[in-house]
């Protein structure tokens, strides 16, 4: 493009060519600041053709905000006398393109001699791309700073000699130091290292590292209040291409808590291993889908195996279970996997040397939300010693039970054998005492016969009680419940025992509560209970005393109370035991061998009831028998009686 100028008579010379080929806009003004020169670069930057601007005022290229002051600024420059000047030292300069777009410019202005057709020339460079690059550089710098200072890792930049150039904020926060104090110092000369070993490690690493390499190690530093900080340190050396220098970057991670936690974990595992060894309890984890079985050291020890000494599968475990126990183990596992029952099983295991142990396993199953079993956690305990002790106890108990059974059978046989001759003795002595076969002229003989009959009856009663106890222990006593009323129970029982009461002139006061439903009990067994309780009360009551027999309902239970005002008991803890009586000395006042209350307890418990006693020495006793057997049909009777 030719150079367009209002000055005629000038040819195209080298200067004109320079102006037209310049990448910067060159704009010349006359003394009135009208445009007289507008090169090709100016056309490109501002978007105007040269024909559109020649002779026009410069203001058309200026932002409206500076047009009013621009002329004064130029006049001020004119008065300074300097030939050239760079503008925009204090502020950014913009031109306005034909499109209205603001264009950032770097402007130099030149002043020509007065009288010249070109009084001022401005050389304008479009710096849009430069500003965009600078903006991106600033943004990248900000991003770098943000990442640099918000990193959880301590980051230190050094030159290749190891002199500190910059710390990030994490260094300041963790070590509680001020970066300015250490800028320019060699990193190993910084005072925050814990000891000589630590800064020596750093010095050696810096001197040793090469470009592209990475060196890692653990070192100790000291933070606030001399707190020891354990650092995991990584050094990298990188090449800066544009100036051919190198940087060393330190990244350090505070692993103090991790080391402490790991130490605690190791100690915890060690304690667990010791506890498992002492208790002979190992643990296992079975991933069901992949069939991977993980054992603890103690679990391996129980099976007498080295760690990882077998294939880690369920089948390998099952192969060591005793063949006779495998089906039981598998059935227990299947039921647990189905959720039908917990996994708890005891079984035998066979070691490689043929030794047999007994192990107990307890497992807990982890399931997905839809209930699918995915993993089992559990324990394996060596219970061989416990199992052997239990077997010994079982055998001892079996032998004791067999011995007790033999004793009971012996007592039963002996009692049966004695009962037959006793019946004859009682019968014949009664005949003699009543002189049924003829008069006895010697009264003493008749009295002897009476004593023989009475003693025989007492002995027969003892034998019958022994038979009752032995039959209970042999399981020969059967519970045959039926409906009965409380009054019939009372009447039938007292008819048996009334003669005993009469012999000691003892009154028996009775009461039957209102609204007692029909009872569903074994009449014979319940009658024996009541007879034995009343007989016991008579035995320990003074002559002419009073005994109360009360039948009633309490909280839905049928209750029999037998109350005496006899000698009472200081300690009633053992009175229901076999052959136990208040006084078992040979010269005791009261008869019996301690069977009656044992029979009461046995026959009550056989019917699902229980016995309680409340006794005070010298005050008397209350024996209470409870049955949960009241039926729904009420028998509304209240009967009071008194028997002598």
Image: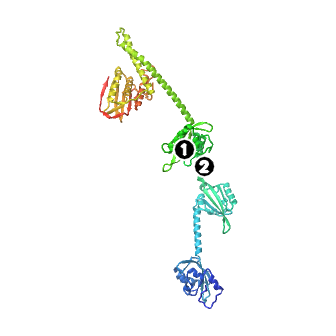
Tell me if 121 is positioned left or right of 568 in this view: right
Quadrant, the N terminus: bottom right
Residue, disc 1: 378
Seen from the viewer's position, the closer of residues 470 and 22 is 470
* Crowd band around label 2 with a 10 angstrom C-alpha radius: few (<14), some (14–19), many (20+): few
C-alpha gap between disc 1 and disc 2: 25 Å
Image location of residue 632, percent across then percent down? 33, 35
Left or right: residue 551 versus residue 93 is: left
Residue pushed farthest top? 441
Residue at disc 1, secondary structure: strand
Asked which quadrant contains residue 608, the reply is: top left
Where is residue 128 drawn, in percent x and y?
58, 75
Quadrant including the C terminus: top left
Could you say whether the residue bearing mark 2 is in a helix, strand or loop? helix
The answer to whether residue 591 of the structure is visible from this angle is: no
Q: Quadrant of residue 554?
A: top left
Viewer-side label of 1, 2 = 1
Nearer to us in this view, 574 or 499 = 499
- 63 vs 460, left or right, is right
- Which residue lies at the image location 56% right of the left edge and 46% below the top edge? 285
- Report the side of 325 relative to 491 (left or right): right
Whether the residues at callouts 1 and 2 have beta carbons within 8 Å, the answer is no
In front: 221, or 281? Answer: 281
Q: Is residue 641 above or below residue 206?
A: above
Percent x, y of residue 468: 42, 24
Q: Which mark is residue 351?
A: none
Name which quarter of the figure residue 489 lies in.
top left
From the image, tell me which residue sits under label 2.
263
The correct choice, above or below, for 383 with respect to 207 in the image is above
């Amino acid at each position: 493009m030719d150079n367009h100028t209002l000055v005629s008579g000038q040819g195209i010379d080298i200067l004109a060519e320079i102006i037209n080929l310049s990448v910067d806009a060159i704009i010349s003004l006359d003394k009135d600041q009208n445009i007289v020169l507008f090169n090709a670069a100016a056309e490109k930057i501002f978007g105007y053709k040269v024909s559109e601007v020649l002779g026009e005022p410069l203001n058309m290229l200026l932002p409206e905000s500076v047009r009013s002051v621009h002329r004064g600024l130029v006049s001020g420059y004119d008065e300074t006398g300097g030939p050239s000047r760079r503008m925009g030292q204090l502020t950014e300069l913009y031109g306005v393109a034909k499109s209205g777009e603001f264009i950032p410019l770097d402007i130099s202005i030149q002043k020509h001699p007065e009288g010249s057709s070109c009084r001022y020339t401005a050389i304008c460079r479009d710096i849009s791309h430069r500003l965009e690059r600078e903006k991106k550089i600033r943004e990248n710098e900000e991003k770098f700073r943000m990442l640099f200072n918000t990193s959880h890792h301590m980051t230190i930049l050094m030159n290749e000699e190891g002199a500190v150039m910059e710390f990030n904020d994490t260094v300041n926060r963790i070590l509680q130091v001020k970066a300015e104090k250490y800028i320019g110092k060699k990193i190993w000369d910084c005072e925050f290292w814990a000891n000589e070993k630590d800064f020596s490690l750093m010095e050696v690493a810096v001197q040793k590292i090469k470009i592209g390499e990475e060196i890692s190690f653990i070192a100790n530093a000291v933070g606030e209040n001399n707190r020891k900080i354990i650092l995991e340190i990584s050094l990298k050396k990188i090449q800066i291409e544009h100036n051919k220098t190198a940087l060393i970057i330190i990244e350090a991670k505070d692993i103090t808590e991790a080391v402490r936690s790991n130490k605690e974990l190791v100690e915890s595992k060690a304690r667990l291993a010791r506890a498992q060894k002492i208790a002979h309890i190992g643990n296992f984890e079975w991933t069901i889908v992949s069939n991977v079985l993980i054992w603890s050291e103690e679990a391996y020890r129980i099976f007498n195996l080295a760690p990882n000494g077998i294939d880690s599968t369920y089948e390998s475990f099952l192969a060591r279970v005793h063949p006779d126990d495998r089906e039981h183990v598998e059935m227990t596992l299947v039921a647990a996997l189905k959720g039908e029952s917990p996994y708890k099983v005891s079984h035998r295991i066979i070691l490689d040397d043929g030794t047999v142990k007994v192990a107990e396993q307890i497992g807990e199953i982890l399931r997905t939300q839809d209930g699918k079993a995915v993993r089992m956690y559990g324990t394996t305990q060596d219970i061989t010693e416990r199992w052997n002790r239990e077997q010994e106890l079982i055998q001892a108990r079996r032998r004791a039970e067999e011995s007790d059974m033999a004793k009971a059978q012996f007592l039963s046989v002996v009692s049966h054998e004695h009962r037959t001759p006793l019946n004859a003795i009682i019968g014949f002595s009664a005949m003699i005492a009543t002189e049924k076969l003829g008069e006895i002229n010697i009264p003493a003989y008749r009295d002897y016969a009476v004593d023989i009959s009475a003693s025989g009856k007492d002995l027969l009663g003892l034998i019958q009680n022994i038979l009752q106890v032995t039959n209970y222990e042999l399981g020969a006593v059967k519970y045959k419940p039926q409906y009965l009323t409380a009054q019939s129970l009372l009447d039938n029982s007292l008819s048996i025992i009334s003669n005993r009461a009469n012999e000691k002139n003892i009154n028996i006061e009775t009461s039957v509560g209102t609204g007692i439903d029909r009872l569903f009990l074994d009449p014979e067994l319940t009658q024996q209970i009541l007879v034995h309780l009343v007989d016991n009360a008579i035995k320990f009551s003074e002559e002419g005393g009073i005994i109360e027999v009360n039948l009633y309902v309490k909280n839905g239970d049928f209750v029999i109370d037998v109350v005496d005002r006899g000698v009472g008991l200081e300690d009633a803890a053992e009175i229901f035991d076999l052959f136990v009586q208040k006084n078992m000395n040979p010269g005791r006042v009261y008869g019996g061998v301690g069977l009656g209350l044992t029979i009461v307890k046995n026959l009550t418990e056989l019917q699902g009831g229980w016995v309680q006693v409340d006794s005070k020495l010298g005050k008397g006793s209350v024996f209470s028998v409870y049955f949960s057997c009241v039926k729904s049909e009420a028998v509304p009777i209240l009967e009071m009686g008194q028997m002598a």
